[in-house]
């Protein structure tokens, strides 16, 4: 299976964003770059963007969500290991909600694209 260049770039962008989220989760609180929004909204947007980008590279949104929701919750729980941060259940839920929202929208987009496709499109004779 060969991947086109757009898929490779989306996969790379997703990997970089995941690495940035992991780093932002585990570094000291004063090293973080904040957007100025409430931290719950920042978590939602970060995980929404991550899920949307990964769904561009791997068009199986529910599988992406099944991998990223536990990842988001685990990263929030790992903040207990940092000296200046505490894990927060609402924050983990907002991150999981960002993942679920993006995955559901991506799944809806795939469903609509499949519904609009001609009956014989995609089938090989």
Image: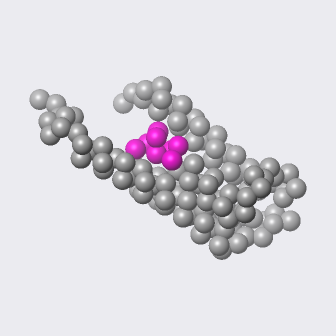
Question: Viewer-proximal residue, 91 or 1?
Answer: 91
Give the side of residue 18 with respect to residue 120, left or right.
right
User: x and y percent of residue 94 in the render?
Assistant: 60, 66
Indicate left or right for 82 with 96 as reference.
Answer: right
- Residue 63 is at least partly visible in this image: no
Queried whether the magenta region covers residue 54, the answer comes back as: yes
Answer with left or right where residue 11 lies relative to residue 25.
Answer: left
Q: Position of residue 12 (x, y in %)?
A: 57, 35
* Residue that appears at 11% across and 29% down: 125
Which quadrant of the structure image shows residue 85?
Answer: bottom right
Q: Is residue 57 above or below residue 62?
A: above
Q: Look at the image and say whether residue 66 sits in the magenta stretch.
A: no
Q: Nearer the viewer, residue 7 or 71?
A: 7
What segment carries the magenta color?
A: 52-59
> Residue drawn at (48%, 25%), measured in percent from left and top?
5
Where, by quadrant of the figure, is residue 30 drawn?
bottom right
As drawn, 9 above or below 73 = above
Question: Number of callouts in the render?
Answer: 0
Residue 91, percent across and down? 66, 68
The residue at 65%/73% (across/down) is: 90
In which quadrant will I find the N terminus? top left
Q: Quadrant of residue 16?
A: top right
Q: Residue at x 54, y 31 (%)?
A: 9
Give the main secondary structure, helix, strand or loop, of the magenta stretch: helix
In the rendered image, the vertical position of residue 81 relative to residue 3, given as above or below = below
């Amino acid at each position: 299976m060969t991947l086109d260049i757009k898929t490779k770039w989306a996969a790379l962008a997703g990997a970089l964003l995941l690495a940035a989220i992991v780093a932002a989760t585990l570094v000291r609180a004063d090293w973080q770059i904040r957007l100025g929004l409430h931290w719950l909204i920042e978590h939602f947007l970060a995980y929404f963007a991550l899920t949307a980008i990964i769904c561009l590279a791997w068009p199986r949104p529910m599988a992406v969500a099944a991998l990223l929701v536990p990842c988001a919750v685990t990263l929030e729980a790992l903040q207990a290991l940092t000296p200046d941060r505490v894990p927060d259940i609402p924050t983990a839920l907002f991150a999981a909600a960002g993942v679920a929202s993006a995955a559901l929208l991506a799944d809806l987009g795939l469903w609509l694209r499949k519904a609009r496709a001609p009956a014989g499109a995609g089938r090989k004779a």
